[in-house]
Image: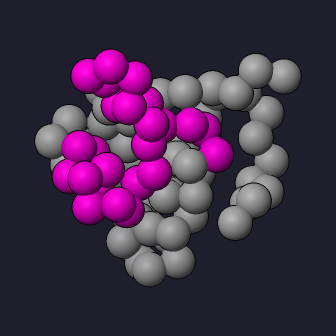
Amino acid sequence: MEEKWYTVKEIAKLLKLNDETVRRAIQRGNLRSAKFGKVYRVSQIDLEAYINNAKEQGLCNRKQHGGKKVELAGDYEGNNAN
């Protein structure tokens, strides 16, 4: 199975955030990423960990997403390797 990688723009759209908010999360080390040339990419596993961490800290508001669970591409089962 091939790992899914997301761009800053894709994450911003998925989470309904500004691109700059996602970049700041990366720069602060809150969202793990890899830099390919000039472009940041975030693995599906790292994005899921970021979302779970936000939920645990009470920073995630489901109203922002219409009360629906945010679904990611692939068949990630929520296992965290950390």
Give the residue displayed 84% in from the left and 22% down from the top.
Answer: 1
Q: How far across and down, in percent of the image, does residue 58 sit?
A: 42, 78
Q: Residue furthest right?
A: 1
Tell me the quadrant of the picture where the C terminus can be found: bottom right
- Given residues 71 and 41, the one toward you in this image is 41
**Residue 79 makes an appearance in the image:** yes
- Given residues 43 and 56, the one toward you in this image is 43
Residue 18 falls left or right of residue 69: left
Q: Which residues are magenta?
A: 22-45
- Given residues 77 and 16, the one toward you in this image is 77
**Residue 66 makes an appearance in the image:** no
Res 3 quadrant in image: top right
Residue 80, compared with residue 3, is above or below; it is below
Q: Is residue 58 magenta?
A: no
- Given residues 72 and 67, the one toward you in this image is 72
Residue 75 falls left or right of residue 20: right
Give the residue displayed 49% in from the left and 58% down from the top.
Answer: 50
Q: Is residue 42 magenta?
A: yes
Q: How far across and down, in percent of the image, does residue 64 sit?
A: 33, 52
Q: How far across and down, in percent of the image, does residue 35 sit?
A: 38, 31
